Each structure stands twice: as structure tokens, then as C-alpha cells.
Image: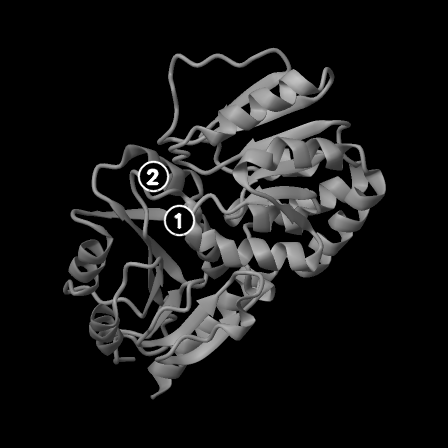
Amino acid sequence: MGGGRRGQVVTPRALLAADCGRGVGLGHLERMLALADALEPDVEVSMLIPQGDVVIRQRVADRGHAPLEAAGDTPARVAAVAGASVPFDVVVLDGYVFDVALQRRLRDRAPLSVVDDLCLPAACDLAVNPAPGGGALRPEGAGAFLGGAAYALIRESVVEARELALRHGREPRTVLVSTGATDPTDLGRSVSHTLLERDPVVQVTRVVGPDSLDMDERALLRERLLEAPPDLADGLATATVYVGAAGTTAVQAACVGCPAVITAAVSNQAAQAAALEAAGCAVVVDAANLADACLALLDDLPRRMEMAARGRALVDGCGAARVADAIRHLVAARAGS
């Protein structure tokens, strides 16, 4: 029998590119890693990362995905790799740095999906806004659109943590503090130390990101430091309250049913913070009031129980699978055209 490829099953190849690197934070990368988990094994995934970034390379490799390194800023990396001789069957971008001109060039070569919670102009086959409240924010120039908490890109370990919390309950007066991978104002340390000073029994787990890690820092009594953990699933499963930024971790907290006290650590988190508060699973305050609001919530069990139920109802943890299915359909449609 001739024909070479006839009868063979050819695995589609996907390039996933998140805006990431020193000073950017890990939210975009974490969303792409969750999507990569959902795409494999029937899609071969390459995760585009900054050349020489050991921390991100290890983070991707530890999740079982293939890192693909390239030089330059994020748009330059995408343009160089996507324009190489070896083609991809689909490209997925996550971030705010991919302009319409670049998207058009990429879309000429392969189906293109863009994950963006700011409703920026697009030129893609599929736009995804995975933020709570994102369902009404279809960007101009998107061929198709998925939006809202049903498409939140949540990794499987977080979904498992959701079930663990339901079975075993939460530790009393334990707070998980995470204010982002960069935390330029040292907000996490300030909140943690205030809680410990004002409550004689509270236990605090404070996340220290790769860009904010002080190698000489030592934890206080009743404080545990988590240095750039691979994920926060275990902490979200056991903490009484999550306190911190209104980014990716706040959405994960909703999924796990961990009541949250959050602030928009950067301006692009404001809409998501408002949506989480409107859904009843988070309290939104200014950064200076995080500790006060957390202490009040620790003393209000009925409110915490209601917030936990509302969070689980809002974010069911199946968003990555839904987006992965939509991307598979993009690949199949282009292959059949």
C-alpha cells in the first residue's frame, strides 16, 4: 500500500504563547498551562517561553509540557517561532501585547485563538475571555467568542482541591496570602504581618513569587512562606480565607470554595474583582484594608459558608476542557476546508 500518510493518525501541533517573564507575573502562563493540560494527549503542545528563563522553563517542564525557548520580548518570540519552517496547526496567545497586525500574520498561517480579559481589538478565529463577568466583552475582530466564568482556565489539581475541601473542611483561622508574583509594593508581607500582630491565633501562609523573593527573609511565628510554589491548590483547599490580588488565584479560590478578600493589585484586575464581588464569593477592598476585612470574615462563619457555595457555583472548573474542545474544532475545521 502506498500513499505514505494514508491511514496514519497525525497529531495536531499547538503553539501556546503566554506573555510571561521577569516582571510580568505568572497569571497568563498559568492559564496556558491549564489549557495545555486539557489539550493533551491528542494535541501536541509546545509552550513558548523566554530564552534562558530557568524558573519558567522548570515550571513548564514540571507540568509535563515541552518548553520552546526564543529570544526577545513576547511578541517577537511569537513572530519568530510561528513564522518558522515547521508549521503549527493552531496558535493560542494569552496576554495584552499581541496587536492586530501580528494576529493577522499568525492567522494567515494557522487558526488563531486569543485569550484576553480586557476586550482589546482582535483579528483571530476564536477569542476567549475567561474572567468572571467576561461574557459580555466580545472583542471587535473575533470570528467566534467564549466568555465568562464557565471558560475560566483552571488546572485539574485545583478542581481536585475543590473536592478535597468539600470532603474534609478547612483549617480554623488559617489565611492564604498571595499578592502576585512581582508584588512591587511588598503588600503580601504587610498584610501577613498585620494579621499576625492583631490576631493571637491566626496562621498565615504567605506566597512569595519568583520576582519578589528575598533570599534572607525568614518567616515569623505562625507564618509559613511558600516560595514560588508550582500551584496553590493545597493552600486553597485548607485555608479559611484567601487574601490577595484579584487575578488568577482569586478565580481559583472561587472554584475551590475559599472565601476571598481581594484587591485590584493592578488596574486590569478591577473588572474581575467587581465580578467576583457581584457573584458573592469575594469582598473587594483597597489594599490598605485587606487585613481588616479578613479579620472580620474570619469571625463570620455563616457569611463564609455562603461565599464558598457561591464561588463553587460560579466557577465549576471545567473551563479548560471547554476551551480545549473549541480549539480542537478550529483545527478540524481548517483541516477540512
Q: What's the residue type where badge 2 is placed?
A: Ile
Is residue 319 at least partly visible in the picture? yes
Q: Residue furthest bottom?
A: 337
Q: Quadrant of the C terminus?
A: bottom left
Q: What's the residue type where badge 1 is placed?
A: Leu
Apparent side of residue 171 relative to residue 37 in the rendered image (left or right): right
- Residue topped by disc 1: 29
- Residue topped by disc 2: 56
**Lower position in the chain sequence, tag 1 or tag 2:** 1
Q: Quadrant of residue 120?
A: bottom left
Mark 2 surroundings within 10 Å by alpha-carbon count, few (fewer than 14), some (14 through 19), many (20 or more)? many
Is residue 153 at least partly visible in the picture? no
Q: Residue furthest right?
A: 302
Question: Residue placed at 77% from the left, 52% from the top?
Answer: 309
Residue closest to the eye, 289 or 84: 289
* Residue 262: image location, x then y, percent: 58, 43
Q: Quadrant of the N terminus?
A: bottom left
* Residue 288: image location, x then y, percent: 55, 34
Do callouts 1 and 2 mark residues in contact (Cβ within 8 Å)? yes
Apparent side of residue 238 relative to residue 26 in the rendered image (left or right): right
